[in-house]
Structure formats: structure tokens, C-alpha cells
Image (cartoon, rainbow, N blue to C red):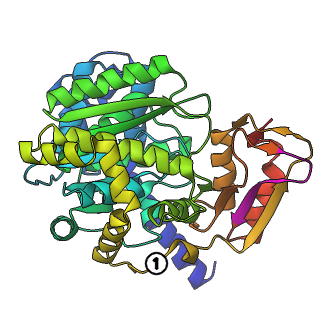
Amino acid sequence: MDQYSFLLYLESDKKFLQRRYTNDQKPMINPEIREDIQRKLAGKELTYPEIYAIMDEIANGRLGDVLTAYFAASGYAHSFSDEELYFLTKAMIETGDTLEFKGIVADKHSIGGVPGTRTTLIVVPIVASAGFLIPKSSSRAITTPGGTADDMETLANVTFNKEEIYRIVKKTNGCIVWGGGVDIAPADDELIRVEKPLMHEGFDKILVSIMAKKVAFGSNHIVIDLPYGPHVKVKNIHDAKIIKEKFEFLARKFSVKIEVIEHKVEEPVGRGIGPTLETKDALLVLEQDEERPLDLEKRALKLAGNLLDLCLTSAGKSLNKEVKEKFGNGNKWAEDILKSGQALLKMKEIIQAQNGDPEIKSVDLLPGKFSYQVKTKKKGTIKNINSKNATLIAKILGAPHEKKSGIFLDKKVGDQCIIGDTVYTLYSESEYKLKEAKDSMDNFPIIEF
């Protein structure tokens, strides 16, 4: 072995030992914590001190990937009780940092799982334009080809510390930042990291993750978008109602106002799947362009309107009177803010405050240079778009890490097709990945007639 190879060997061995003894195999793990995880895997309930101790170990990187994964798995094998959900949420908050804002603090969050549905980039500037604070903590992709933070990153920086977030919100009323950029619920980020390879989150984990970060970010008026359908995280209305009740339980525990909106989904509401294409859709709506995806606009207005109505329940009488006289309700108020151009101007302010180019337009957002049009070989009506398969193909194309990669849906559910029509277009930054996606289409069909 030459000297260079020997040094490489030593360096790799050093990294292995560091990983082994500072992470998975660290010898100083409290045996009681290991026993608590074993008990939870066996279906036993844990107390708050026990859950806090586990969250503290995870938050400080002392538990290691193996035990962290086992603890995450315990939530799949045996769901947590309502009281345990509260304990988990409280412990996640208390083992990290928190933000505090005065007055009404709004937030909107989707449980995710539906690619091509980027409503947050529309809702935040609408609500901020209305005069309410909406400091939006967003996640990166877990089960989809792009999370809100991945998408916003195509327009501006999303990683800021507490003081910078305060500055941005003070200047614009809102922000769209990556939650992992600050020490907010750090245990959740570690749990997400070990779950990510599985491309799956348990319902209890989703609840705790969302509520911990919302409360830690100071939110007290929250709208939850809860889609369900055969190809997304929540499969049916029965499960959706159970999740809704648990959200409402946690909201009462933390004294926040919440509205959970369950709705059935058959397809993405936008046409773009992947960070650049999803962001382009959102900007088209904000710009009120003729080519904007109207389904996305409708969904965003519904969420923004409900959030404005929720905020008005805590607002003064004069504002309620003004909104009622001018618009009638929050939905009409949101629509006026969007169609008048106020939301677009606010989004430009937020982009600039987050060190992006405020003059960027939808036309500037170009997908990957390697593309392939998928054409139908038969005549018919599109009955369904398989969101799960679309996610898999978009990931093969390179999304979300390669932000210009993804899928554009040329046709949607209900559209008539003739032989030779383009039904969707694949985009990638890599010619090899485009080929891999093309070769995978037969195994993961996106369009169903």
C-alpha cells in the first residue's frame, strides 16, 4: 500500500470510528432511555419525563441513528396515545429554541404527500398583505419531489437565524424559511432525517412535527390542509377525520386556534412537479397570468380565505366591520388581494428581504434542458393522475436536489385525449437521469384512462 492509499485508509477508518462512537454506538447512552424505547416498541405508554429524555437525546445528537430509527418505528408499530402526542409535541418544543411575536400570528400548513400543490407561496403574501403576521416555517421534501423550502429556495435564501427572521417579518409581515435553519424542534429534524429513506411518515409523527414547529414559531391561528385520496399519505376520509380530531386536541392543549380542512384529491392542483416547475405555477397565479393553473389558484384562495376568517375571530371590531362591508368574508378579501396585485407586490418584498431578486418573473424559471414529451397511444379521457408514481418518476429525474428537474402535466383529470397528444413532459438536468425516468415509466404509470 503506497503512502497516499494508506492516508486515505486512515482517514476513512477515522471517520468510521467517529461515526460509530459519536452516533449509533456511543457508549454513554443512558440504559434507561434504551429501555424506554424497548417498552414503546412493545406497545407501552411513556410518561412525559421519559419522552422528554428521549427527545433531549435526539435533539442533541446523542441517541444515534439506530435508536432514533427504532423510536420512530415505535410510532408505526403502536400509535401514540393522545396524551403521548401532547408530551412529544411539548418535548420537541422545549428541547429547541422558540420565536415570539405579539398579537395574531397566522400559519398555514399542509400535511403533504401531494406533488405539484404549492399553495404556500400564494397564501403567505395574501395574508401578509392583509396586515397579519405570517412567519412561515417550511420543510424540505420528505415524501414529495419538492417541499416548500425547496421551492422557495429557487427564488431566495431560506436559511436564517432567529434575529434575521425577526427582521424579515418586521419588514414584510411574513417570511417563507426553512425550519431547520434555526434550532426549532431539532429532534424533529433528526427524526425526519432517519425516516427519509423510507419515503414515509406515520400520521402521529406528522401531527407532532407540524404542531411542534407551529407552536415553537409563535403561531396561534393555524389552518391545516388535510388532503386524502388513494395515492397520497392519507387514504380515506375515516383516517382524515381521526387526524383532524388529533390536531384539534393538540391545538386545545397549546391554546391555539385551528381549522383543519379535509378534502379529497385526485391529482396535483398545479401542473408543475418539482421545485422550479411548482414555483413557476405559484408565480403565474400571483402574476394573474392567463396561463396560470386555475385549480391551484382556487385551492390557495380557499386556504387563505379560511385563514383570514380565523384571524378575524381575534381581530378588533373595526377591522371585522370593514372586511364585512367591503368584501363580506375572508375568501372575498383574499381574492381581492390576489387579483389587485397586492399579493404579488408583497411576495416581491419577501423575496427581497430574503436576499433574492424581487424582479424575478415566472418566465425566468426554466426547467432542466433535457426533456421528453410523453404522448398518448390511445384516445380517451384522463380519469386519474397517480401522485405516488409521479413522485417516484420526478425523484428519478433528480428532484428535489436538482431543482430544475421534474414533470409538467400537459393534461389533467377530465381532459380528452386523442392519439399523439402530449400528456406530460419530463425534465431533467441530467441526460442519464432522463433516460432512467423514461425506462421506469412502464413500471410507474402516471396517467390513468
Quadrant (top left/top right/bottom left/bottom right) for the N terminus: bottom right
Which residue lies at the image location 48% right of the left edge and 46% below the top edge?
298
* Image: 56 above or below 155: above
Which residue lies at the image location 37% right of the left edge and 63% below the top edge?
340
Residue 440: image x %, image y %? Answer: 79, 49
Which residue in the rendered view is the most extreme toward the front?
325
Is residue 401 at all visible to an observer of this figure? Answer: no
**Is residue 258 one of those drawn in magenta?**
no
* Image: 236 above or below 185: above
Q: Residues within 10 Å of mark 1 (few under 14, many from 20)?
A: few
* Image: 88 above or below 432: above
Q: Which residue is mark 1?
A: 360
Which residue lies at the image location 38% right of the left edge and 78% below the top edge?
358
Is residue 344 at all visible to an observer of this figure? Answer: yes
Residue 292 or 226: which is nearer the viewer? 292
Quadrant (top left/top right/bottom left/bottom right) for the C terminus: top right
In-image side of 65 versus 27 (left or right): right
Which residue lies at the image location 17% right of the left edge and 27% below the top edge?
252
Q: Quadrant of residue 370?
A: bottom right
Q: Which residues are magenta?
A: 417-427
Residue 43 or 91: which is nearer the viewer? 91
Residue 131: image x %, image y %? Answer: 19, 58
